[in-house]
Amino acid sequence: MDQDKCIGVIICKLDRHRDALRGYIAMLAVKKEYRKRKIGTTLVKIVINAMKLKNADEIVLETEYTNLGALSLYHNLGFIRDKRLYRYYLNGVDAFRLKLFCKSEIQIPIVEVSNRAIVEKTKK
């Protein structure tokens, strides 16, 4: 939030999928003028931490295969490309399904974050 205006949002859920507890990130958005301030990264870290506390086995999402910013953000947080989904979007663009294994020893540690961190980033 910046002066009571929403500048970023993340939509997610946690459900059973087969024999696993799977988190799903449906959408991440940050207003253009607030990008490159780690707000999106902070929002994803908050979700990852919350899902890990709820014992999620994995977290998945889809992003356009040409969205280099999103691919970089998620890669830096430990997500891997699980599969390419051809013509996934209504406009015919392909997507990558990305996956984070929450209980793996090789994942990068998630730094503790708070809502205050988001506010601090917006003031810069």
Image: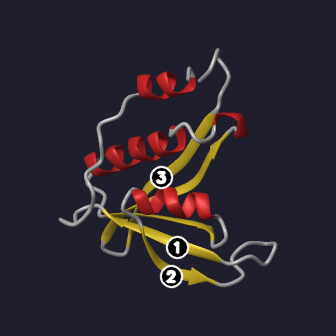
Q: Which of the two labelled residues, at mark 3 and mark 2, occupies the earlier sequence position?
A: 3
Q: Nearer the viewer, mark 3 or mark 2?
A: 2
Q: Quadrant of the N terminus?
A: top right
Q: CA distance from mark 2 to mark 1?
A: 5 Å
Q: Residue at x 36, y 75 (%)?
A: 18
Q: Amino acid at mark 2?
A: Lys
Q: What secondary structure is marked by label 1?
A: strand
- Mark 3 is surrounded, within 10 Å at the Cα level, by few (under 14), some (14 to 19) or many (20 or more) other residues, namely few
Asked which quadrant contains residue 76, the reply is bottom left
Q: Which residue is mark 2?
A: 83
Q: Which residue is mark 3?
A: 13
Query: Residue 15 appears at what percent x and percent y?
Result: 41, 59
Q: Which mark is residue 97?
A: 1
- Mark 2 is surrounded, within 10 Å at the Cα level, by few (under 14), some (14 to 19) or many (20 or more) other residues, namely few
Residue found at the very far left of the displayed protein: 105
Report the front residue among 120 and 20. 120
Q: Nearer the viewer, mark 3 or mark 1?
A: 1
Q: What secondary structure is marked by label 2?
A: strand
- Image-based side of 2 in relation to 46, left or right: right
- Image-based side of 124 in relation to 19, left or right: right
Q: What secondary structure is marked by label 3?
A: strand
Q: Amino acid at mark 1?
A: Arg
